[in-house]
Image (tube, rainbow, N blue to C red):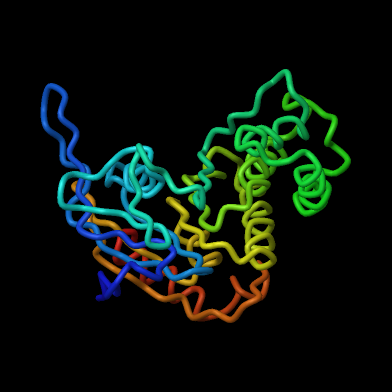
Amino acid sequence: MKVDNAESGAEAAIHVHKVGKTFDSHVKIQALQEVNFTIPQGEFVSILGPSGCGKSTLLRVVSGLIDPDEGGEVRIFGHRQSHRDMSDDVGVVFQTHNMLPWDTVESNIRLAAEVRKLPKQELDKRIDALLPVLKLEKFRGSYPHQLSGGMRQRAALGQILVTRPKVLLLDEPFGALDALTRDQLNVELLRLWQEMRQTVLLITHSIAEAVFLSDRILVMSEHPGRIIEDIRIDLPRPRDPRTSKEAVEFGRYVARLGQIMGVD
């Protein structure tokens, strides 16, 4: 078992050190306890764990949306992350898209970049390059209600990708979709990552999804969440759903992770 491969967060894309998080309303609830890991630039890492173990809380701490308890820290390329000083290198995609229903696909994808005051000429170039990659070029003038669930999630991903973050945080972005659409979008996500090589941290409940996409998988314990396993996925890249998922080693990873998580 390997739970902390970090020596220093100075050069890492993501460095999480002694992160804990306790919520105090009527009763104190400790969501995270002593979480440690490092993700080098360009690596695709997934986090697995039982429901309620703090996966989404951890992602929000890494994003800077909430701060860890005193003594813990998150660094993004050496920048200390906090809700008062969030790194511009980070983009976050949640399970539910936040597209404005009265705006077109193109207008929605432009939003975050316009907020950051990206020059119009540069933004136009990025949009023209990104829409074909997302397979949304023919739908740039469509409205969210005219799109399938998978297309809306691709557009939500585009809202972040157009800002070109170095670190992409994904909180179950395909979790609400049917199994077939989810599998199709996993292939699209992997294709995008192989083209852009951003650092990706994905929260998922799907063992097979994590194995198919990832270079490494971090497994969290029951509440309060800790990293109890750090498993490298040594499957050849590039991956495709047929050959990769039919490989004997793929099945072994799925079985091993199922045992760790108590799925028999």
Percent position (x, y) of residue 168? 52, 53
Left/right placement of residue 155 relative to residue 179 reads right
Percent position (x, y) of residue 219? 32, 61
Where 225 sits versus 144, above or below? below
Q: Which quarter of the picture shows residue 7? A: bottom left
Q: Which quarter of the picture shows residue 254? A: bottom left
Identify the residue at the far left of this view: 27
Q: Which quarter of the picture shows residue 22? A: top left
Identified at 29% across, 65% down, the residue is 260
Identified at 77% across, 38% down, the residue is 120
Where 171 sits versus 146, above or below? below
Identified at 71% across, 36% down, the residue is 110
In the picture, the quarter occupied by the C terminus is bottom left
| Observer-nearest of 163 and 22 | 163
Percent position (x, y) of residue 146? 78, 27
| Observer-nearest of 89 and 31 | 89
